[in-house]
C-alpha cells in the first residue's frame, strides 16, 4: 500500500505533518517512516524517523500515531531523507518512541 504523502495525525488527532518516505529492511518488511513536519512550500521541513510500531491506524489518505506531536518532534531527524537510516539512528528512533 502506498503511504507516502498521507497526512500524519498524532495521538490527540492533530494533523502534524505528512509521510515523506518509507523504509523497509532487506526482507522488504516495513520498519520506519519519515514524518515531514513544518516548513513552507517544501523548504525548512524537518524529517523525523518514526518506527512503524508507532502507527495506530491507517485511513485512506492518512495515518494516526500512538504518540503525540512532542514525541515526533523529539525523534531523530534525517539529514538525508532519501538515504536509508543507519543502525544507530534506527535504534535511537525506537528508544525515543518507546519511552
Image (spheres, rainbow, N blue to C red):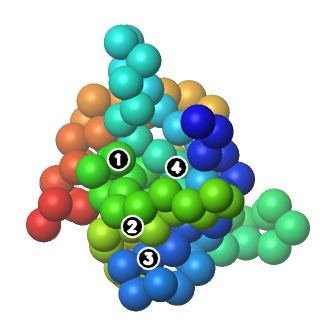
How far apart in space, not on screen, are marks 3 and 2 (Cα)? 5 Å
Q: In the image, residue 66 lies at what x, y percent?
A: 31, 69
**Residue occupying the point 26% across, 36% down:** 88
> How far across and down, in percent of the image, does residue 28 sit?
42, 18
Mark closer to the chain start, 1 or 2 = 1
Using the rendered view, name the quadrant where residue 25 is placed.
Answer: top left
Considering only order in the chain, which callout, 2 or 3, is on the residue closer to the N terminus? 3
4 or 2: tag closer to the N-terminus: 4
Q: Quadrant of the N terminus?
A: top right
Lower position in the chain sequence, tag 4 or tag 3? 3
| Label 4, label 3: how far apart the Cα atoms are | 14 Å
- Residue 68 in the image: x percent, y percent? 36, 79
Give the foreground label among 4 and 2.
2
According to the picture, the residue beneath numbered tag 1 turns out to be 52
Residue that badge 3 annotates: 10
Crowdedness of circle 4 by 10 Å Cα count: few (<14), some, many (20+)?
A: many
Disc 1, disc 4: CB below 8 Å? no
Residue 67, by quadrant, is bottom left
Instruction: Say which of marks 1 and 4 sits in front.
Output: 1
Identity of the residue drawn at 56% across and 76% down: 16
Res. 5 mark = none
Q: Examine the rendered structure and indicate whether residue 58 appears above or below residue 92.
A: below
Q: Does the image show residue 44?
A: yes
- Of labels 1 and 4, earlier in sequence is 4
How far apart, in angstroms, are the residues tagged by discs 3 and 1? Answer: 14 Å
Q: Secondary structure at mark 1?
A: helix
Q: Are marks 3 and 2 in contact (CB under 8 Å)?
A: yes
Location of mark 2 (residue): 65
Q: Tell me the crowding category of disc 3: few under 14, some 14 to 19, or many 20 or more residues within 10 angstroms, Cα based.
A: many
Q: Is residue 5 left or right of residue 74?
A: right
Amino acid at each position: 500500500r502506498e503511504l507516502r504523502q498521507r497526512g500524519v495525525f498524532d495521538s490527540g488527532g492533530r494533523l502534524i505533518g505528512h509521510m515523506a518516505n518509507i523504509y523497509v529492511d532487506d526482507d522488504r518488511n516495513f520498519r520506519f517512516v519519515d514524518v515531514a513536519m513544518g516548513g513552507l512550500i517544501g523548504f525548512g521541513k524537518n524529517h523525523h524517523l518514526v518506527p512503524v510500531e508507532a502507527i495506530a491506524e491507517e485511513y485512506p489518505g492518512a495515518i494516526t500515531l500512538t504518540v503525540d506531536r512532542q514525541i515526533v518532534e523529539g525523534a531523530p531527524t534525517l539529514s538525508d531523507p532519501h538515504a536509508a537510516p543507519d543502525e544507530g539512528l534506527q535504534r535511537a528512533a525506537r528508544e525515543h518512541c518507546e519511552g
